[in-house]
Image (tube, rainbow, N blue to C red):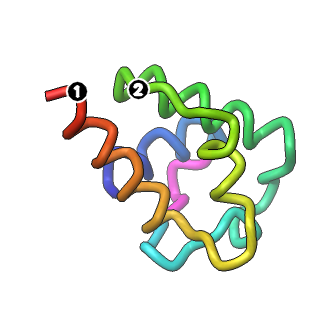
Amino acid sequence: MKQVQDVLRNVFDDDELTIEPATTSADIDGWDSMMHINVIIAVERKFGVRFAAAESNAIKEPGQNLGTFCALVDRKLAAKA
């Protein structure tokens, strides 16, 4: 979660940005479609993972949050190991 938060701080250029597992994309000012793409690319680069289109869009769907997204990143990292 902390590493994803660091990525988001960089993407949104906001050193004060904090996230919780229940944080959604709607909770973060400026998270629009273009920023969503930037977030996905930045996370892929940071962790050396790739997201399928359905996975990358899932975070913006109702009921999804950054906790779910971080769990997806963890699963992808575990699969690489």
Which secondary structure class fits the magenta region best? loop
Look at mark 1 in the image and give the residue it sits on: 80
Look at mark 2 in the image and give the residue it sits on: 49
| Mark earlier in primary sequence (2, 1) | 2
Q: Quadrant of the N terminus?
A: bottom left
Label 1: state its secondary structure.
Answer: helix
Which residue sits furthest right?
A: 33
Q: Position of residue 47 (x, y in %)?
A: 35, 28
Q: Is residue 35 left or right of residue 4?
A: right
Residue 8, located in which quarter of the rendered image?
top right
Q: Which amino acid, by three-letter code, is at mark 2?
A: Val
Compared to residue 29, the image places residue 54 above or below, namely above
- Front disc: 2 or 1: 1
Residue plotted at (86% across, 44% down): 33
Q: Residues within 10 Å of mark 2 (few under 14, many from 20)?
A: some
Q: Position of residue 21 (x, y in %)?
A: 43, 73
Q: Position of residue 81 (x, y in %)?
A: 13, 28
Which residue sits furthest left?
A: 81
Q: Which amino acid, by three-letter code, is at mark 1?
A: Lys
Whether tag 2 and tag 1 are in contact, CB under 8 A, the answer is yes
- Name the foreground residue: 30 vs 39: 39
Q: Position of residue 70 (x, y in %)?
A: 40, 55
